[in-house]
Image (cartoon, helix red, strand yellow):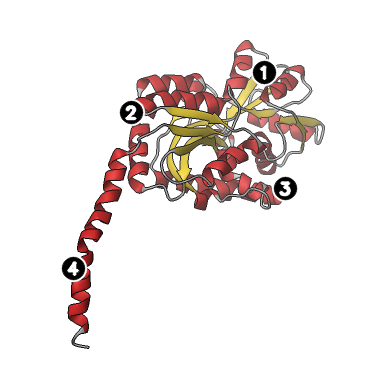
């Protein structure tokens, strides 16, 4: 036993140079990052809202990091395919995903068998980018002026009113189902292939309501072809001034927010995450980006990684309850 101590001490001394080199290498590697282009996967088609916003962010981020940001559009399965690709990518800081809340919030409950990734385990939050409420929209000819009027009409015509959505499990579908439950009204879902088709159906009176993305709804509101009864954020929106919230019209706590955020594969080194978060916060808060976001009715909302994780967890709890009540599965 007495011989063991000198032997171990000597071994430690002999290994000390190697340990020092190992400690220095990661720091040097992190200081050099990025040394090549970064790929930002957008799991939606070119020209879609997430694609446009990702490109808005990517140019100033490229300037800040000194490397090109390459946008890779990988659409499919409501954003799940591209998001899954990034969840399985190498966590080296050279692959990011710019996505919306669907693949991060509702997808795990809707696609339990086939999703192939866990948003909270397989992806590292970088920052929230922006948020936008939905707009409760009705035909311009419908004899209602606010949410209370619409609820009264729906009760009078129980089961006779339709609403448009972009399919089961979509934000437009789940928000309306939550509203139906809280208001105790009966509306029939009519699914369409996209929001442009929904707004056309509302204008024509084929459906009597729909929770719409503002970029599609507001030009028709401004033309008088449809009415905007409410927005689904808890706070009023500067870009949607004059439209009251659901919260202030008798539905306290009613929130159905669309958001955009950036993630990396889980295990991405903390210094890279911190650098990206710092650079992106400055970009998102810049006057130029804020102006471009406002044009699409988005509010800048940079966050810490922990704040983004908290939002995902809270949103999952809210929408999982709706999905389970509906018995909805998309597997």
Mark linked to residue 64: 2
Residue indicated by mark 4: 13
Q: Mark 3 vs mark 2: which is more N-terminal?
A: 2
| Nearer the camera: disc 4 or disc 3 | 4
Q: Is residue 197 left or right of residue 221?
A: right
* Residue, disc 1: 226
Q: Which residue is mark 3?
A: 331
Q: CA distance from mark 4 to mark 3?
A: 58 Å
Up-down relation of residue 108 to residue 44 (above or below): below
Residue, x 64% and y 48% (percent of image)? 115
Q: Nearer the viewer, residue 96 or 241?
A: 96
| Label 3 secondary element | loop
Q: What residue sits 50% from the left and 28% below the top?
A: 71
Q: CA distance from mark 3 to mark 1?
A: 35 Å
Separation of residues labelled 4 and 1 (CA atoms)? 78 Å
**Foreground of the two, 267 or 50:** 267
Q: Residue at x 63, y 11 (%)?
A: 223
Residue plotted at (67% across, 47% down): 110
CA gap between label 2 and label 1 equals: 43 Å
Please state which of the two labelled residues, at mark 3 or mark 2, is closer to the viewer.
2
Asked which secondary structure carries label 2, the reply is: helix
Nearest to viewer (mark 2 / mark 4) = 4
Q: Secondary structure at mark 4?
A: helix
């Amino acid at each position: 036993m007495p011989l063991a101590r000198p032997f171990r001490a000597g071994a430690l001394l002999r290994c000390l140079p190697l340990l020092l080199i190992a400690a220095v290498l990661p720091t040097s590697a992190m200081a050099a990052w990025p040394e090549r282009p970064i790929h930002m996967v957008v799991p939606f088609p070119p020209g879609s809202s997430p694609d446009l916003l990702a490109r808005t962010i990517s140019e100033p981020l490229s300037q800040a990091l000194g490397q090109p940001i390459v946008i890779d559009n990988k659409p499919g399965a409501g954003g799940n395919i591209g998001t899954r690709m990034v969840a399985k990518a190498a966590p080296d800081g050279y692959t990011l995903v710019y996505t919306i809340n669907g693949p991060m919030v509702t997808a795990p409950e809707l696609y339990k068998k086939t999703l192939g990734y866990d948003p909270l385990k397989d992806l590292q939050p970088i920052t929230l980018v922006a948020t936008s409420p939905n707009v409760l929209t009705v035909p311009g000819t419908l004899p209602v002026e606010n949410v209370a009027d619409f609820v009264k009409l729906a009760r009078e015509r129980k089961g006779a009113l339709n609403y448009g959505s972009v399919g089961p499990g979509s934000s437009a579908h789940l928000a309306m189902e939550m509203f139906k439950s809280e208001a105790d009204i009966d509306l029939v879902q009519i699914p369409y292939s996209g929001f442009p088709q929904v707004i056309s159906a509302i204008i024509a009176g084929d459906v009597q309501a729909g929770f719409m993305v503002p970029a599609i709804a507001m030009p028709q509101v401004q033309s008088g072809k449809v009415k905007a009864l409410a927005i689904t954020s808890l706070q009023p929106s500067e870009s949607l001034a004059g439209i009251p919230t659901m919260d202030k019209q008798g539905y306290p706590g009613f929130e159905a927010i669309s958001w955009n955020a950036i993630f990396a594969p889980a295990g991405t080194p903390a210094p890279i995450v911190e650098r990206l978060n710092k650079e992106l916060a400055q970009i998102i808060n810049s006057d130029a980006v804020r102006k471009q976001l406002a044009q699409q009715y988005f509010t800048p909302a940079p966050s810490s990684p922990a704040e983004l994780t908290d939002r995902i967890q809270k949103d999952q709890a809210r929408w999982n309850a709706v999905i389970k009540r509906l018995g909805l599965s998309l597997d």
